[in-house]
């Protein structure tokens, strides 16, 4: 089966565009009301054709079942300030009626052996095409700033080692993952003070503009 990749990926690009707008708007709604937003920033991407083909080969996925068996063609990453914010975002997603959660994996309470921490949600999302509505699968990863920094570095190293890290690198990754989590724990302990400071800063910034 030959795949017309431009036509195949167009709905996924539209889904990522729409989801980014929706989650960024959700963040702004908190800020507009003068409240702490559990969302710090949102990014998204659609897998490249080469990345999809590589995963098809590695996971033995046939073209006929890509849409159901490859859950991360459309990917959204929501980054938060605090660990508690992650679970607030999870609840907000569950409450929405424009997407349906079909799978969840909590790698924060159950970190991967590498030290990786994040909360993964797989959702069913509908985009509207000229020929009618189409349901797609998309993956949402929710993590703190510290977790995101660690994961970004780990991903960069993975390009070099293809997952086969030398022992010393693996140990350093586990150690730094734990350090990042401890940072999150310490920041959570002073969360109220941080949020109060942010409110004062925002209020003063507004006065300066006026």
Image (spheres, rainbow, N blue to C red):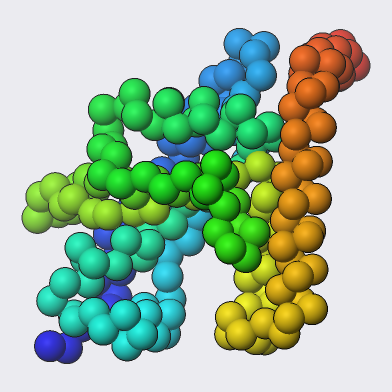
**Residue 176 visible, this orientation:** yes
Q: Residue at x 29, y 67 (%)?
A: 70
Tally of marks: 0
Compared to residue 51, the image places residue 85 above or below, namely above
* Residue 56 spot, x, y in % from top left: 30, 82
Residue 77: horizontal and vertical position, in percent?
Answer: 53, 50
For the residue pair 79 and 98, the one nearer the viewer reads as: 79
Examine the image and state in which quarter residue 52 appears.
Answer: bottom left
Q: Is residue 110 above or below residue 159?
A: above
Is residue 170 depicted above or below 29 in this figure?
below
Q: Nearer the viewer, residue 20 or 197?
A: 197
Residue 104 placement, left or right of 100: right
Q: Is residue 7 left or right of residue 140?
A: left
Say which residue appears at 38% left-offset and 62% top-offset.
72
Q: Quadrant of the N terminus?
A: bottom left
Please tell me which residue is depicted at 31% across the width and 80% down the height of the picture.
59
Q: Residue, x 30% and y 46% (percent of image)?
A: 103
The residue closer to the viewer here, 23 or 93, is: 93
Q: Position of residue 8 (x, y in %)?
A: 24, 71
In this view of the protein, can residue 198 be seen by the observer? no
The quadrant of the picture occupied by the C terminus is top right
Counting from the top left corner in percent of width and height, residue 28 is at 58, 26
Kindly give the residue lying farthest to the left in the view shown: 131
- Left or right of residue 183, residue 24 in this image: left
The vertical placement of 26 against 150, above or below, is above
């Amino acid at each position: 089966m030959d795949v017309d990749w431009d036509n195949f990926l167009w709905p996924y690009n539209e889904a990522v565009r729409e989801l980014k707008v929706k989650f960024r708007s959700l963040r702004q709604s908190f800020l507009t009301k003068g409240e702490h937003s559990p969302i710090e920033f949102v990014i998204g991407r659609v897998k490249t054709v080469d990345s999809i083909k590589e995963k098809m080969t590695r996971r033995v996925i046939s073209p006929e079942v890509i849409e159901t068996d490859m859950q991360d063609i459309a990917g959204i990453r929501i980054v938060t300030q605090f660990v508690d914010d992650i679970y607030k975002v999870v609840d907000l997603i569950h409450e929405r009626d424009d997407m349906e959660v079909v799978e969840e994996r909590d790698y924060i309470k159950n970190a991967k052996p590498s030290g990786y921490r994040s909360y993964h949600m797989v959702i069913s999302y509908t985009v509207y095409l000229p020929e009618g509505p189409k349901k797609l699968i998309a993956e949402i990863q929710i993590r703190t700033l510290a977790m995101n920094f660690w994961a970004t570095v780990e991903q960069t190293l993975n390009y070099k080692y293809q997952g086969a890290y030398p022992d010393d690198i693996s140990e350093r990754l586990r150690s730094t993952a734990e350090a990042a989590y401890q940072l999150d724990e310490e920041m959570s302990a002073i969360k109220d003070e941080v949020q109060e400071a942010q409110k004062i800063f925002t209020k003063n910034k507004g006065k300066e503009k006026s």
